[in-house]
Amino acid sequence: MAKQTRGERNIRWIEDYCRIPEGRDVGKPVKLRDWQRREICRIYDNPHGTRRAILSFGRKNGKTGMAAFITLLHLCGPEARANSQLFSAAQSRDQAAILFSLAAKIVRMSPDLTSVVTIRDTAKQLACQELGTLYRALSADASTAYGLSPVLIIHDELGQVKGPRSELYEALETATGAQENPLSIVISTQAPTDADLLSVLIEDGLSGKDPRVIVSLYSAPMDADPFSEEAIRAANPAFGDFQNATETLAMAEDARRMPSREAEFRNLILNQRVDMNAPFVSRNVWQACAAPVVESFKGLPVFGGLDLSEVSDLTAFVPVAPVDTVWNVKPVFWLPGEGLTEKARSDRVPYDVWAREGWLHTTAGSTVDYEFVAAYLYDFCEGHDVRKIAFDRWNWRHLKPWLAKIGFSESQIDDGDAAIFEPMGQGFQSMSPALRDLESALLNGRIAHGGHPVLTMCANNATVQADPAGNRKLSKIKSHGRIDGMVALAMAMSVAGTWENVPMEQSYMSRRPMVVL
């Protein structure tokens, strides 16, 4: 008989001594599925030794059960080391209690484990006094993680960490220095954005730079039909087994009928990197509007939105023009050329690649000077029938002098209805109707953006904030990443509404192009 591998030995121990803690088969001996066996063997039979293992799949696939089995392996099973400390870490006390509770149930249902493991419910601890091993569940009170020396760490639902850092994660990971061959296991659905800690760890693991890091990522492809059984199966290895297929398919139908549920469904069930925080537009709707844009706006009425950022940040000018019944979008973005690579690295966005490919314009030096923006707008207005350009009042006082200096007349800058430039507030009162118009155009396929990558990034990041009356605005504070292009597009569509009420023929015949002479 062939000698058992370490992983096979651990599988056998789990099936011999552990019981199913809850559900329809509660109390029965554990029978690991093939995919669970593969994951355990990947962790323990890695020829390089495993320092970190990341297992990521959709909800209700037995993540916490797997974590509990692995915890007991190291507490009183063949992976146990005398006098060692084991910890699970979660972002909330309730989440921390779930893994402890499940492990405690497994112990209580197994006469063999009950005889060697002491359960301390109040402290959320399991102890094997014979071996001197101790397991403890921790929540995101980082002060409790200092002074510890773990040999095993289970990071439960690390995808809930917002941003690239977690004090609890760092405190535990840096506490393993005194241990030989410590093991960290992350079991979680994906984080919402590329900038979150779990996403950073997954991308690092998938790069293959450290063979001691393994990643098992079960996720539906972003271009798949999100409501199909095929997409669900890709992210849910337990689908149709101990994950209720009927209930999961019903969730898909709910998300199909109610777009507000789609982001949640994609993140939690399809295990996709999608923000659940009130997204303005779903990826499906945005991708459906990626039709090609006309080569030139010359001869068409043009409306624009201008989002003036700080001079060292992303600035967006988004003009739109009607072609038949579809608003074509040709955005322009600027970033300072100096430090572009560093900004791409810090934002985890390929600004440098986009600049090389022509999607993003760079300016000399470390700022986007308002003089430069004013000169671009002057040239653009000379060559196009520009009716209105909406702008955020915030930085207007810096841009206005340059517009006059570059050649715009006073009437074009600041003459009420006759002016090209129109101030637009960014609060609920102004932005809510603008978002309603933009949303309607997107849902009805009356936008064509050509898949512009910088604008698409802004669309993916765009998050709405609502007031008690239900009015909405795009929130840069709540959004993950840059949204300047979507702010400018919303402003452009707002002023474009002044044209939509006029027949196209009348609009062309009755208005002179607003160009600088």
Image (cartoon, rainbow, N blue to C red):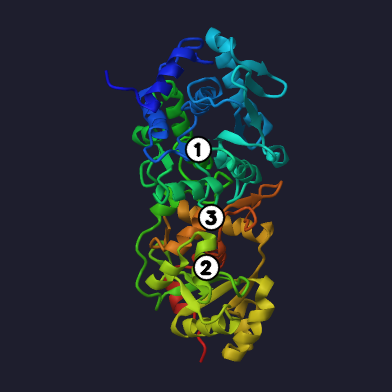
Element at label 3 = helix
Q: Earlier in the sequence, mark 2 or mark 3?
A: 2
The CA distance from mark 1 to mark 2 is 34 Å
Q: Earlier in the sequence, mark 1 or mark 2?
A: 1
Give the residue pinned by disc 2. 342
Q: Earlier in the sequence, mark 3 or mark 1?
A: 1
Foreground residue among 192 and 376: 192
Element at label 1 = loop
Name the residue type under label 1. Asn
Name the residue type under label 2. Glu
In the depicted structure, whether residue 482 falls above or below residue 95: below
The spot of residue 324 in percent (x, y) is: 38, 64
The spot of residue 405 in percent (x, y) is: 61, 91
Give the residue pinned by disc 3. 461
Name the residue type under label 3. Asn
How packed mark 1 is, by other alpha carbons closer than 10 Å (few <14, some 14-19, many 20 or more), is few
The spot of residue 100 in percent (x, y) is: 61, 24
Q: Which residue ends up furthest to the left in the rendered image?
A: 1
State which quadrant residue 128 falls in: top right
Foreground residue among 44 and 198: 44
- Which residue occupies 55% across, 10% down? 109
Foreground residue among 165 and 59: 165
Element at label 2 = helix
Looking at the rendered image, the quarter that the N terminus falls into is top left
State which quadrant residue 307 falls in: bottom right
